[in-house]
Image (cartoon, rainbow, N blue to C red):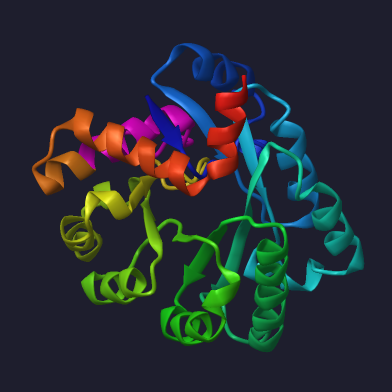
Amino acid sequence: MLIDTHSHINHEKLVNELPEILQNLKTGKVKRVICPSFSYSSSITSLEMAKNENVFCALGIHPEMANEYDTKMEKFLIENANNPKVVAIGEIGLDYHYGQENKDLQFQVLLRQMELAKEFDLPIIFHIRDAFDDFFEFFEKHKNLCKRGVIHCFEGDIEVAKKALSLGLMISFTGLITFKTRESVREAVKYIPLEKIMVETDAPYLTPEPFRHKVNRPEYVELVAQKIAEIKGESVENVEEITTQNAYDFFDKMRKFDESK
């Protein structure tokens, strides 16, 4: 089996495909999906999505939406963090891709959500884009707040990977590793131990080759696993087994939920 550890199946681009996606979770190779949040409204719909048997969720505010973090959002997080289907805080982090005008606010919101992750004993899904240096400096100061952390949709090179691993972070790969222009990311895949890797689609975005111009879906995470196997010279079965084990170890509430059934 496979676990898609980061898939926005509550996105409007997937609304018409959702019944088929949910059915495929019952019958296909991809058996579990974690639906992360990026805003207040998506936190609500992610939690709603997790009412489906094979769907879990993460709650949080994306750095680009940092101005949405208010008392209403904090109340929502606190009220729902103990829900057995809420398996992480995320996606949270730093994103300078479109500028750094709200940089200070991003730091404030990231810190507060990390504090809540610590309070509720939840792992963290980090979104880091064009901000690795600042993030690593910040994380070193506050890593005591992080039970376990993963950098989702990793797009760094080997040097970034080395720093992430030295800080005890997991790394998750998307269909980005199948893109011709992303050789530096493939080099990072080759370097990172399989025991530190998880797989995701980040659906509906970053559809892997050969379906790049289609809307991404959880089933396509199998193509990510296959590419990792090719890059590392591993069997696909081994990659699937280890990344699934990694996901269950990282999202321990998901493991507990499944074991309690």
Q: Which part of the image, by quadrant, shows the C terminus?
A: top right
The span shown in magenta is 208-227
Q: In terms of depth relative to the viewer, which is nearer, 178 or 30?
A: 30
In this rendering, would 215 be left or right of 225? Answer: right
Q: Which residue reaches farthest left?
A: 233
Residue 259 in view, yes or no: yes
Q: Which residue occupies 39% across, 39% down? A: 213
Q: Which residue occupies 42% across, 47% down? A: 206
In the depicted structure, whether residue 159 falls above or below residue 46: below
Across and down, in percent, residue 115 comes to 70, 71
Residue 216 among those drawn in magenta: yes
In the depicted structure, whether residue 96 falls above or below residue 231: below
Q: In terms of depth relative to the viewer, which is nearer, 92 or 155?
A: 92
In the depicted structure, whether residue 150 falls above or below residue 33: below
Q: Which residue occupies 57% across, 81% down? A: 142
Q: Quadrant of residue 245?
A: top left
Q: In terms of depth relative to the viewer, which is nearer, 4 or 101?
A: 4
Across and down, in percent, residue 65 comes to 71, 67
In the depicted structure, whether residue 141 falls above or below residue 72: below
Q: How many marks?
A: 0
In this rendering, would 68 be left or right of 33? Answer: right
Q: Which part of the image, by quadrant, shows the N terminus?
A: top left
Q: Quadrant of residue 67?
A: bottom right
Residue 179 among those drawn in magenta: no
Residue 209 in view, yes or no: no
Across and down, in percent, residue 111 comes to 67, 77
Q: In terms of depth relative to the viewer, which is nearer, 41 or 136?
A: 136
